[in-house]
């Protein structure tokens, strides 16, 4: 009987579940959450010089401070 990569045992699924719970417990909810949306790399070579440009676009989710006035 051959199992494929998508066939996960009950123990594997249970371990993944426990891992997610532990990560949730250890994660600070007040910390900023940054998600990388897109990364673009451009490389150009001219006369023995390499020009490398990297653009990283991120989204940062900030929790609002309850004591500060709301932004409009």
Image (cartoon, rainbow, N blue to C red):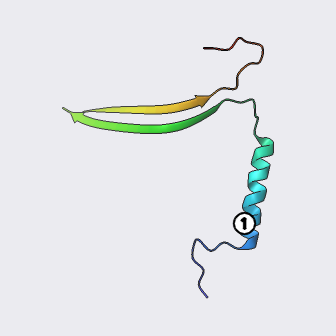
| Left or right: where 63 falls relative to 45 | right
The residue shown at (57%, 37%) is: 35
Residue found at x 47% / y 32%: 57
- Identity of the residue furthest to the bottom in this view: 1
Camera-nearest residue between 26 and 49: 26
Question: Compared with residue 16, is residue 46 higher up or lower down, i.e. above or below?
Answer: above
Q: Quadrant of the N terminus?
A: bottom right
Q: Nearer the viewer, residue 51 or 6?
A: 6
Q: Quadrant of residue 51?
A: top left
Say which quadrant the C terminus sits in.
top right
Residue under pointer 1? 13
Residue 53 position within the rendered picture, expressed as x and y whole percent measured from the top left = 35, 31
Query: Residue at image x 74%, y 52%?
Result: 20
Q: How far across and down, in percent of the image, does residue 71 sit?
A: 63, 14
Answer with left or right where residue 30 lies relative to residue 7: right
Q: Position of residue 65 (x, y in %)?
A: 74, 19
Residue plotted at (38% across, 37% down): 40
Residue found at the far top of this picture? 69
Neighbor class of circle 1 (other Cα within 10 Å; few <14, some 14-19, many 20+) is: few
Viewer-nearest residue: 46 or 28: 28
Q: Is 22 left or right of 1, judged from the image as shown? A: right
For this orientation, the residue located farthest to the front is 72
**Residue 9 located left or right of residue 34:** right
Secondary structure of the residue carrying numbered label 1: helix
């Amino acid at each position: 009987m051959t199992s494929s990569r998508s066939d996960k045992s009950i123990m594997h699924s249970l371990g993944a579940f426990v891992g997610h719970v532990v990560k949730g417990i250890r994660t600070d909810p007040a910390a900023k959450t940054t998600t990388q949306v897109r990364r673009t790399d451009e490389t150009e070579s001219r006369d023995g010089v390499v020009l490398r440009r990297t653009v990283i676009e991120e989204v940062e989710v900030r929790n609002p401070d309850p004591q500060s006035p709301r932004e409009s």
